[in-house]
């Protein structure tokens, strides 16, 4: 499971600077069960 906070940390470590809104949009695009996180089987 990946949260917006964790996604932001990873992206910043890669030199990006996404806003909270952008991070939420990224999560929403792949959030199959609408729980606000990216889940992996």
Image (tube, rainbow, N blue to C red):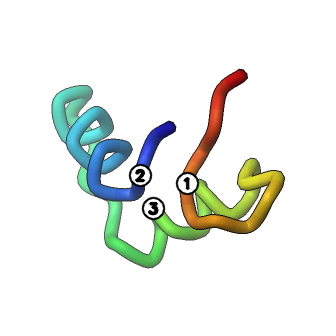
Query: Can you give x and y, in whole percent of width and height, for residue 34 in the image?
Result: 74, 67
Q: Earlier in the sequence, mark 1 or mark 3?
A: 3
Q: CA distance from mark 1 to mark 2?
A: 5 Å
Instruction: Tell which of 14 and 33 is nearer to you.
Output: 33
Residue 23 in the image: above or below residue 16: below
Q: Which residue is at 82% across, 52% downward?
A: 32
Q: Position of residue 12 (x, y in %)?
A: 20, 41
What label does residue 3 carry, if any? Answer: 2
Q: Which residue is tagged 3? A: 23
Q: Nearer the viewer, residue 8 or 16?
A: 8
Position of residue 13 in the picture relative to residue 39 (left or right): left
Pointer 1 residue: 37
Q: Residue furthest right?
A: 32
> Decide: marks 3, 2 in contact (CB < 8 A)?
no
Which is closer to the viewer, label 1 or label 3? 1
Circle 3 SS class: helix
- What percent of the width, then of the height, locates residue 9? 21, 42
Q: Specify which label sits upstream in the sequence, 3 or 2.
A: 2
Tag 2, which secondary structure?
A: loop
Q: Nearer the viewer, residue 37 or 24?
A: 37
* In this picture, residue 22 sits left or right of residue 19: right
Query: What's the distance in space between the residues labelled 1 and 3, CA to CA?
Result: 11 Å
**Disc ID at residue 16:** none
Say left or right for 9 vs 38: left
Taking the image as shown, residue 24 lies to the left or right of residue 7, namely: right
Quarter of the image with the C terminus is top right
């Amino acid at each position: 499971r990946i949260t917006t906070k964790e996604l932001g940390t990873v992206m910043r470590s890669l030199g990006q600077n996404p806003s909270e809104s952008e991070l939420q949009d990224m999560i929403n695009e792949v959030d199959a069960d609408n729980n606000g996180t990216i889940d992996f089987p």
